[in-house]
Image (tube, grey):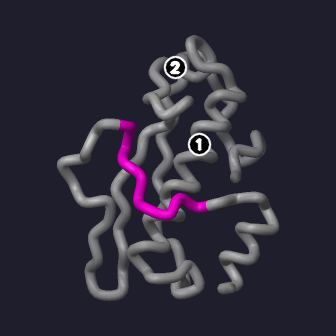
Amino acid sequence: MAAMDERLKSLGIVLPDVMPPVVDGYVPAFAPFARSGDQIHLSGRLGKEDGKPLCGKVGEEISLEQGKLAARGVAIELLAVLKAAAGDLDNVRRVVKLLVMVNGAPHFTEPSPRCGWGI
């Protein structure tokens, strides 16, 4: 087993066997990833709860805990896509850019590194 697979297993993270759709029953009109030379660009994902899009603003309709779980799910889906694109996560040497967007209420100020949003 590859080192990254071992690490994910030790964290209790199981990657989906196939690249999951953005939401159940929806086939995206874009590719889940594109390769340009040695770089892989991943398409965005939506936060979900029970397989359905999580709609609303964090801090209003969506709780902080729901937001954290949705962010974790998105990260796991992206790792699955990256693994499929690279053949193995051990082949990944560097993340050049990571863009995260949170639909937060106007008063919501929690999404920061201090908040513990990591997987």
Side (left or right) of 119 relative to 48: right
Instruction: Tell me residue 40's x, y (percent).
Output: 36, 74
Is residue 97 found inside the magenta-colored segment of the image?
no
At 37% across and 44% down in the image, what residue appears? Answer: 22
Give the extent of the magenta segment.
15-24
Q: Which residue is mark 1?
A: 71
At 58% across and 23% down in the image, what residue appears? Answer: 58
Q: Is residue 35 above or below residue 44?
A: below
Give the number of the mark in front: 2 or 1. Answer: 1
Q: Is residue 112 above or below residue 66?
A: below
Q: Main secondary structure of the magenta part?
A: loop
Q: Label 2 amino acid?
A: Lys
The quarter of the picture where residue 10 lies is: bottom right
Side (left or right) of 21 relative to 58: left
Q: Nearer the viewer, residue 55 or 26?
A: 26
At 69% across and 26% down in the image, what residue appears? Answer: 64
SS under mark 1: helix
Q: Label 1 amino acid?
A: Ala
The numbered mark at residue 52 is: none
Q: Which residue is mark 2?
A: 57
Q: Nearer the viewer, residue 14 or 112?
A: 14
Q: Disc 2 to disc 1, how far (Cα)?
A: 13 Å
SS under mark 2: loop
Q: Quadrant of the N terminus?
A: bottom right
